[in-house]
Amino acid sequence: MLSLAPFILHVKYFQKLYWFGDSWGLLNQLTHQGLWRWLFFPFAENFVPVFKMLWLGCIYLLNGSYFWLIVCLWLTHALIVYLYGRLLKSWDFPFPGILLAMLLLGLAWTNIET
């Protein structure tokens, strides 16, 4: 939930965002390569076809709304952090270690762009 704080606190600014950066690159590749070639073509960290399908599905389901795409990306990030915590719990890691690992993943400095 802490990683969602910037979005919640500044939601009115996120509603004004337009498509930019990597999103344009991915859409451009999709247009030029076609779906099947694009799915398996690496793009930065997006090399897993499942995540590209999720991203593309969100674009179509949300009618291209960048605001709602950001909401989906943040919710996906929160779900991944939650599942990571559940996995660590199933391996009997102590609670303080699980909490620290979830905080480091959820508030990762590598996700600062978002």
Image: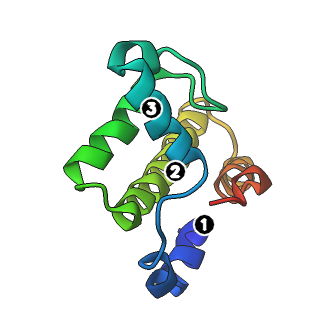
Badge 2 amino acid: His
Compare marks 3 and 1 and give the one earlier in the sequence.
Answer: 1
Q: Which residue is mark 2?
A: 77
Say the numbered circle drawn on residue 114.
Answer: none
Badge 1 amino acid: Ser
Q: Which residue is mark 3?
A: 51
Quarter of the figure that contains the C terminus = bottom right
Residue count near mark 3 (Cα–Cα under 10 Å), binned few <14, some 14–19, many ≥20: few
Q: Nearer the viewer, mark 3 or mark 2?
A: 3
Say the numbered circle drawn on residue 3.
Answer: 1
Helix, strand or loop at mark 3 = helix
Q: CA distance from mark 3 to mark 1?
A: 20 Å
> Where, by quadrant of the figure, is residue 2 drawn?
bottom right
Residue toward you, 3 or 45: 45
Residue at x 34% of width, y 38% of height: 56
Q: Position of residue 111 (x, y in %)?
A: 69, 54
Give the vertical position of 8 relative to 98 (above or below): below
Q: Are marks 2 and 1 in contact (CB under 8 Å)?
A: yes
Give the vertical position of 16 relative to 65 (above or below): below
Compare marks 2 and 1 and give the one earlier in the sequence.
Answer: 1
